[in-house]
Image (cartoon, rainbow, N blue to C red):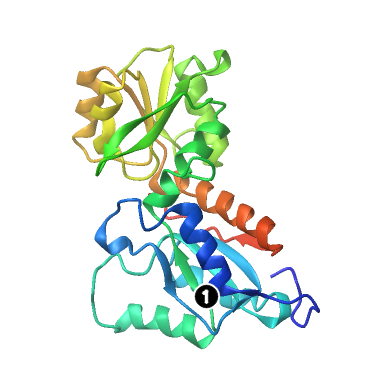
Amino acid sequence: MKTPPGDDVSPVPLAEIVRYLDEYLRVRDVPDERNAVNGLQVENQGLVGGIVAAVDASQATIDGVIAEGPGRGGAAALLLVHHGLLWDGNLPLTGRRYRRVAALLEHDIPLYSAHIPLDLHPTVGNNVVLAERLGLAVEGWFGDYRGVAIGVWGHAPARLAPRDALLHEVNHALGTPTPGAGARLIAGGPERVSRVGVITGGAGNMIGAARDAGLDTFITGEGAHYTYFDAIEWGLNVIFAGHYATETLGVQALASHLAERFELDWEFHDHPTGL
C-alpha cells in the first residue's frame, strides 16, 4: 500500500468498515444467488490499513495483496471484491480453496464481497457507473431480478447516436482494445440508437427485459449463443463488452468512496480474464 508500515496514523477497525458497508450496500436486503454470500467472508484480527479492490477473489488477486504488504500502522489491506470465494458452494477446504483461505489467514487479510448489491447500487453500482462513463443520464430502471429492478437506461447523447460511435465509446470507457478484441456488437436494432440500457456481467438473458422496457440498445457483459437470435429477431442492438471488463468499475467506485470516508489509501488490482 502507499502508506508505509509504521506510519503514526492508526489503522481503522474492521468492524466499523463492515458495519458501514453492510448498511451502505444493503447486503441483507438485496436478493442474490445463495453462493454469493455477500458481506464479510473472511475476517482478520480486527484492523485495516488500506483497501485493495478487485473483481475476483482469485489466487492471483490474493497473492497481489500479499506482495503489496501492509498499509497504515502495519495493518493488512481489506480485499474488496465483486465475486467472492464461495461460488462453487459449500465444499471442503482442500486444494485451491484451501490455498486461498490459508493465504488470507496467514497474512491477516480480511475479505469483503458484494455481488448484486454492488451491481444495482444507485451511486457506486456497476450499472450506474458504466452508464455515467458513457454519458448516459439515468432516466429509469428495468429488468426484474428476483423482484428487484437491476438495470438502468437513458437516452444516448447526440454524439453517441450512431451505433458505431456508441460501440467505440464502450471500448473507451472500459479500456478494452478495439477493433477485433473489444466489445462486440450484435446489430439487431437501428443504426441510430436512442434508448440505451445497461446491465453489467452475464446478463444476456435480460435482452427480453430490455425489449419490454422499450429500449433499442442493450449493453451487458456476455450471453449464451441463443442470445444472438434474441437480438436479431427482437430488433435490438446488443453490445457484449465482457463480463470482467464491465464489472471493473463498481468495485473501484466503492473502494474510492470507502477510502475517502475512512481516510485510507486504495488500489485496484487488475486481473482480466478476457471473458
Figure quadrant of residue 188: top left
Where disc 1 sits, the SS reads helix
For the residue pair 196 and 23, the one nearer the viewer reads as: 23
Report x, y in % for residue 123: 54, 42
Q: Is residue 174 left or right of residue 69?
A: left
Residue highlighted by disc 1: 63
Q: Answer above or below: position of 197 versus 88.
A: above
Task: Specify the quadrant that holds the N terminus.
Answer: bottom right
Q: Position of residue 159 (x, y in %)?
A: 57, 16
Q: Quadrant of residue 76?
A: bottom right
Foreground residue among 24 and 210: 24
Residue occupying the point 30% across, 83% down = 93
Residue 157 visible, this angle: yes
Farthest right residue?
A: 8
Question: Residue at (56%, 13%) from the top-left corner?
Answer: 158
Circle 1 Cα neighbour tier, 10 Å, few/some/many (<14 / 14–19 / ≥20): few
Q: Position of residue 128 (x, y in %)?
A: 49, 37
Quadrant of res 146: top left
Residue 13, percent across and down? 61, 75
In percent of the image, x 46 and y 60: which residue is there? 22
Query: Quick check: can you spot residue 54?
Result: no
Q: Residue furthest bottom?
A: 106
| Amino acid carrying mark 1 in the image | Asp
With respect to residue 74, does 112 lie above or below? Answer: above
